Image (cartoon, grey):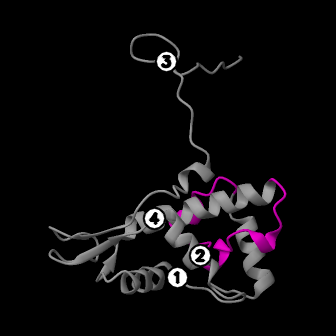
Amino acid sequence: MAITAKKPVRSNGRKSSFKRKTWAEKMLPCRKYEVKKNDYDFADIPAGSKMLIATPKIVDDYVRQIPKGYFTDIKQIRKDLAAGYKAEYTCPVTTGIFIRIIAENAHEEYIKGRPLSKITPFWRALSAKSPSAKKLSFGIKFLKDQQKKEGIVT
């Protein structure tokens, strides 16, 4: 029995022209960060705190600064970014999303032929055991291989 996939259809019955953004487009270089007062308790952030909502570019710049052979977890990244932007906390949800975006973008660049030394070393900030790593479109083998080459144990 053959299974045929249907093309996306708008609610009015016509074909959808929906085009998914590339990982590079999701890097959103023109997006601005925000520091906002959190009105309610959110994750590990108490109400009334100043919370940084970073950008993929900010997280990418941070990860590029992690030295070869070192690993920095998301909690430390959030703490460092908050301090750098005069906030008390950094949003855990967006930071996790942005780490995935930079990983997907870096891997996409690598597949297109960009040298490993020129892509963002996301394996220094993403544990193979993390929920974000399990969502990577390319799996976790590349992540684990790079960590092993640098002697990183997470």
Name the N-terminal-most of marks 3 and 2.
3
Tag 1 and tag 4, C-beta contact below 8 Å: no
- Place of residue 24 in the rendered image (x, y in percent of width and height, measured from the top left): 62, 52
Q: Which residues are magenta?
A: 112-138
Viewer-side label of 2, 1:
1
Q: Is residue 51 left or right of residue 93?
A: left
Look at the image and say whether residue 13 sits in the magenta stretch: no
For residue 107, which numbered disc appears in the image?
none
At a point 64% along the width and 58% down the height, the residue shown is 104
Q: Secondary structure at mark 1?
A: loop
Q: Which residue is mark 2?
A: 127
Q: Which mark is residue 73?
A: 1
Residue at the spot x=57%, y=42% of the render?
Answer: 21
| Label 1 – label 4 distance at C-alpha | 17 Å
- Is 36 situated left or right of 133 in this image? left
Image quarter where the N terminus lies is top right
Q: Position of residue 49 (x, y in %)?
A: 20, 78
Residue type at tag 1: Asp
Q: Which residue is most to the front?
A: 30
- Residue type indicated by callout 2: Ser
Amino acid on which disc 3 is placed: Val
Name the spot of residue 40 as percent of width and height, x first.
15, 68
Decide: is 37 above or below 112: below
Q: Residues within 10 Å of mark 4 (few under 14, many from 20)?
A: many
For label 4, the residue is 55
